[in-house]
Image: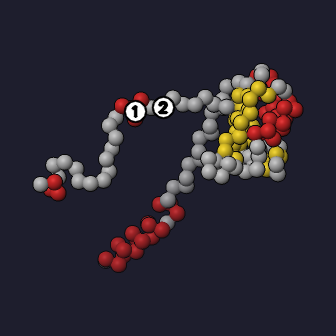
Amino acid sequence: MAAAVARSGFRRMFSVSAFAPPKAPAPRPQADPSPNLFVSGLSKRTTTEGLRDAFAKFGEVVHARVVTDRVSGFSKGFGFVRYATTEEATKGIEGMDGKFLDGWVIFAEYARPRAPPEQAEMNSPPQQSWGASPGSWGSQ
């Protein structure tokens, strides 16, 4: 009897129906059209000047920046481009999204605004995770 129960439990544990397939991630919402672009997939060797030159073919680039690592100075793989108008930004996305830059395929999309910091974190006292808490048996 115990062997039969163990077998059914073992069978249930390793059956396909016991494990649900992972759910597909929800697609990220598209950002509203703006003159600001987010560019990802950049090579470590891509510079701000190279990014500006690549996107300048599609309109007047007001600002371009490749985000770099503080220690190595190399690109972190993403950057930002700001055009003078939204129409030029649309042309920049159409012209550069999925194209090669410095040997890597890059992706261009409208930049999303940065989320505001959470107020709860700023007003809460810092959590102390080391040492004995007051009133515990170790603080007598």
- The residue type indicated by label 2 comes to Pro
Q: Nearer the viewer, residue 23 or 34?
A: 34
Residue 117: assigned label: 2
Image: 87 above or below 136: above
Q: Residues within 10 Å of mark 2 (few under 14, many from 20)?
A: few
Name the residue located 67 percent from the left edge and 41 percent from the top edge: 67
Q: Nearer the viewer, residue 57 or 94?
A: 57
**Quarter of the view holding residue 86:** top right
Looking at the figure, which quarter contains the C terminus? bottom left
Is label 1 in a helix, a strand or a loop?
A: helix
Q: Nearer the viewer, residue 23 or 94?
A: 94
Left or right: 132, with 65 as reference point = left
Q: How far apart are labels 2 and 1 at the CA level?
A: 8 Å
Q: Residues within 10 Å of mark 1 (few under 14, many from 20)?
A: few
Q: Is residue 87 visible?
A: yes
- The residue type indicated by label 1 comes to Met
Name the residue located 83 percent from the left edge and 46 percent from the top edge: 100
Q: Position of residue 125 (x, y in %)?
A: 32, 37
Looking at the figure, which quarter contains the N terminus? bottom left
For mark 1, what is the residue? 122
Name the residue located 40 percent from the left edge and 33 percent from the top edge: 122
Report if the CB atoms under discs 2 and 1 are less than 8 Å apart: yes
